[in-house]
Amino acid sequence: MITLKNIEKVYQTKTIETVALHNVNLHIPQGEFVSIMGPSGCGKSTLLNIMGLLDEPTDGLVEIAGTPIGRYKDKELAQLRNQKIGFVFQSYHLINDLSVLDNVELPLLYRNGVSAAETRRLALTALEKVGLSARTKHYPSQLSGGQRQRVAIARALIGQPEIILADEPTGNLDSVMGEEIMNILLQLNKTDGTTIVMVTHDENMAHKTERLIRFFDGQQVSDAKTNAYEFQKV
Amino acid sequence: MIRHLFKLIWNRKRSNFLLMTEIFFCFLVLFAVLSLVVYNVRNYNKPLGFEHEHVWLLTMRPDTDSTSLNRQTLEQILQRAKGFQEIESVALTSSNAPFAFSQMSNNITYGQKKVEANQYEVQDDFDMVMRVKVSKGRWFGPADNASHHDPIVINQALKQQLFGEEEAVGKLIPLNDSTNYQVVGVTDYFRAGSEFEAEQPSFFSRINLQEDPNAFWNEVLIRVKPGMGVAFEEKMVKEFAGTAKGWAMEVATLEKMRQNKAKMAKVPLIALGIICGFLIFNVALGLFGVLWYNISRRNSEIGLRRALGASSGQVYRQFIGEVLVLATFGLLLGVAFAVQFPLLQVFQVESGVYFIALGIAVATIYLLVVGCAFYPSRQAAAIHPAMALHEE
Ligand SMILES: Nc1ncnc2c1ncn2[C@@H]1O[C@H](COP(=O)(O)OP(=O)(O)OP(=O)(O)O)[C@@H](O)[C@H]1O
Ligand SMILES: [Mg+2]
């Protein structure tokens, strides 16, 4: 589903040059739930941005859902993101002036040929999946952190993407709420077969996923199946 | 997408309130100034109903009050004037000659209708001097000496207000207990005040020197042959002065008088235009600043939209679209206000003037906001999505 080959990412500013990723090679098959761990500043977000086509690697190859990403135009990349990828962020990134329902509908606004009625229906279904059917008319400021993150997940899955990229989705939440979010993601992976890549600082969370990749200083240092994987497959 | 933008702006109406009010007031001022401009331009483009080139206005001031003597001299001057090769025709006029800063009006009553109309007292040859076109009936002349009534010629505007579609020629209008005006002719368009004024109801009454041996008029309109200039003016005044010793005489061309009147009309327009320009400039600056600030504040929203599948072109169009929607809210209010003028007929101005001004004002505001949003929106579209999401 996601293949990275010899990825290099160097941030060049006037004064300093930061190597954020060095020689990253990864293959994530369809339907896998992968977690990525590593100390702050080791390049996790950078990696996710590259997978999410929000950023270009300085060097190397990216292949998403069987499509090699070459010299794509901005418009084509936007369409690929819209159709193949859902994003979940640590700070939710909801638009405060839009209701829960309107926030969830956002991705379909950028997809051609989906009627307003269909969009509404899909948004309600997505909210149902995250257990927020009762909060559709609320505004983000009226919700708890966990609820906000559930709205963000509903937004990520409304377009039925093959991949969800989650950057510390439980980072701002207490353990109970974090648990809730984690369960939703696990459910999504299991029932819809969505490929999920999740960055986390929480070992417990990471061990609930199938595979754990550790990064240090822009490089992969370990890549292994977790016990959870063994459990599930037995 | 449009629905989305309306929702977004509506939900942000609190923070956008100031901008909308600014647009609202800017629109109103623009509408007012444009109404005035359109009114003036429309008038300017209408016919005057006379030809003022090669017409001079001679103003005479006798040195004594002895009327009978002055009358004799006046008639001699008229006689001399007619004797000049260079002069085509002359006619005495009341002081409200075309483009003069003087007005004279009278109430004209017909049946239930009462209209305040400009009155021009002129001699029989006025139609030749000013080349006034009579479209119905005829101009007055010596043939009217025998009439029991005082002949008048009215313009279209007066005809419409008094008689509507009825035939006007032959109608009697009571002047006082013993005399009636009789309409003998109707002119086309006629307006003598200024090129920028609308046509007002007007009529011409006849100066009949025989009838009143003591009456005196100070002003003569003189149509000279084309090409007559200062040299002839000097020659003419010298000869008149020989006849009328001690009289003060002054000659002005109607062209010069037209220019003076035009200046009078233009000065307030230009002043208003400058004020309006400053206002618009201010609003534009404010708008630009607010948009610029908003976009830097909305970095993470931009990043998010890009992540969800918006291309940079779509971000650009969204921001342009937002100001258009914002302007639309301000304009809706403004237009609701502005249409009261034609609907309630606050001033006696054709509705068309308001609608043209309204159209131009709306278009100008839209252009203005798009102009102001252009650069900030391009900046917004150029924001790198990964960077925008990173900041927080
Ligand atoms: N836009 C940028 N310009 C310059 N350097 C950057 C930029 N973005 C990230 N970096 C650098 O790249 C490195 C990796 O950053 P990244 O955000 O990927 O770390 P991270 O692993 O996500 O950290 P955290 O766990 O704190 O989120 C860091 O050293 C960071 O300073
Ligand atoms: Mg990070």
Image (cartoon, coloured by chain):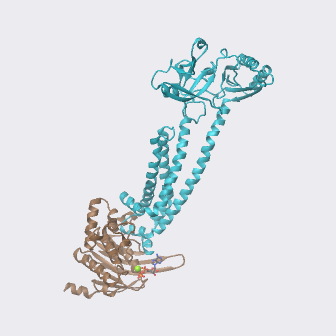
Point 28% across, 76% down: residue: A195
Residue B108's spot in the image, x, y percent? 54, 26
Looking at the rendered image, the quarter that the C terminus of chain B falls into is bottom left
Q: Nearer the viewer, residue A190 or B160?
A: B160
Instruction: Tell whether A211 sits left or right of B347.
Output: left
Instruction: Tell whether B271 sits left or right of A173.
Output: right
Instruction: Tell whether B277 sits left or right of A196.
Output: right
Q: Nearer the viewer, residue A12 or B184?
A: B184
Answer above or below: position of B172 versus A52. Answer: above
Residue A232's spot in the image, x, y percent? 21, 84
Q: Nearer the viewer, residue B302 or A98?
A: A98
Quadrant of the picture in which ligand 2 is shown: bottom left
Q: Is residue B303 visible?
A: yes
Colour of chain B, in one word, is cyan
Residue B112's spot in the image, x, y percent? 48, 27
Q: Residue furthest front?
A: B177
> Which chain has been coloured brown in this picture?
A
Q: Residue furthest top?
A: B146
Tag count: 0
Q: Quadrant of residue B80?
A: top right
Q: Is residue A161 visible?
A: no
Answer above or below: position of A184 versus B281. Answer: below
Looking at the rendered image, the quarter that the N terminus of chain B falls into is bottom left
Q: Quadrant of residue B81?
A: top right
